[in-house]
Image: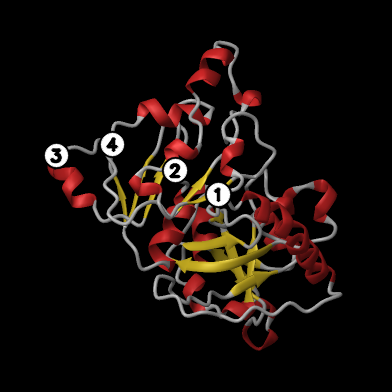
Amino acid sequence: TIHFRSGPGLELPDYVKRKLTTEYTGRLERYDDVTGTGKERLFPLDAIYITPSEPHQLANIPAVSMQIELKTGIDALYVTRLQRERLSPADKEQELKEDYPVVDKKLLKEKEFERTLVMHPLPRVDELAYEVDADPRSMYFKQAVRGVPIRMALIASLLGTREVSVPEEDNPFVRKVDYPVYRRGFGVRCTNPGCVSTQKSEARYIKPEFKIVDYRPLTLRCAYCEHEVHPPYIASSDWHEGKLESKTYHSAGSQWARRIRAENLLIFDSEAEAEAHGFKPGHYIKQRHQDNGKGAGQRE
């Protein structure tokens, strides 16, 4: 079970929730107030996702009135510094610094932290005591040491200079879903402005790539950022017997989205783009044009 409680404007994106519920065998539940019988239904938990109500992680601490009952203890603590660059002008840095939690020997002596691994991206400020460095549970120096060869291996793999093979492990928590891949140099693009595929500096080197994760409605998941896109128009590259009259495009919400094979699927962002590729409006789009004028933004 994954429990999540999000602050305003910091909800789990729909495409993340979709992936959690379709590709993992767990259960996703939202609780705004965890008390009484509601609390009893929550446990045991596998993961807890809590977002702050303000743009700095200290807001996580006083705002959450929830007792977490851990029978087996905490697996890991990932410690980070106070993010000064995210503080608003109204925040009093000194007060926040004094209240910011510190991981030290005293904390790690508590029962729930007996087997807890301590991680940190480094460098630290005051949030992680130096006395923890010699503790066998500290992992942050190993993180730093292993980070370099891992990045080297990733770069070598991306450049094709080394083949990196990782044996697959059976994980009962993860469903193996082989989604069809959509990869073409035109048509639909990721609508996430932060996606690497939309950046001018990268667009000439990489092509948009998506996984077709649903057909009702047609839903594409970006291979680079996992943002989901619902394209408006589709066509088939295998138009019937090569006859021009059958070279038509259709609404992505029509039955054609399920009838066209993935390897033949063509997706367009607009009617103008479909027509620029030599496709003519399908029957229902023609009918819609006659009834309502050319309503390019509507679906069949």
| In this rendering, the label closer to the viewer, 3 or 1 | 1
Distance from Cα at disc 3 to Cα at disc 1: 38 Å
Residue 27 in which image quadrant: bottom left
Is 28 on the left-hand or right-hand side of 261?
Answer: left
| In this rendering, the label closer to the viewer, 1 or 4 | 1
Structural crowding at the residue carrying mark 1, measured as other residues with C-alpha within 10 Å and reported as few (<14), some (14–19) or many (≥20)? few
Instruction: Choose the circle earlier in sequence order: 1 or 4.
Output: 4
Going by the numbered disc 4, the residue's amino acid type is: Met
Q: Residue furthest bottom?
A: 241
Asked if the residues shown at circle 2 and circle 1 are in contact, with their CB atoms under 8 angstroms apart, the answer is yes
Residue highlighted by disc 1: 135
Q: Which mark is residue 66?
A: 4
Residue 272 in which image quadrant: bottom right
Going by the numbered disc 3, the residue's amino acid type is: Gly
Q: Secondary structure at mark 1?
A: loop
Q: Tell which of 102 and 193 is nearer to you.
A: 102
Structural crowding at the residue carrying mark 2, measured as other residues with C-alpha within 10 Å and reported as few (<14), some (14–19) or many (≥20)? some
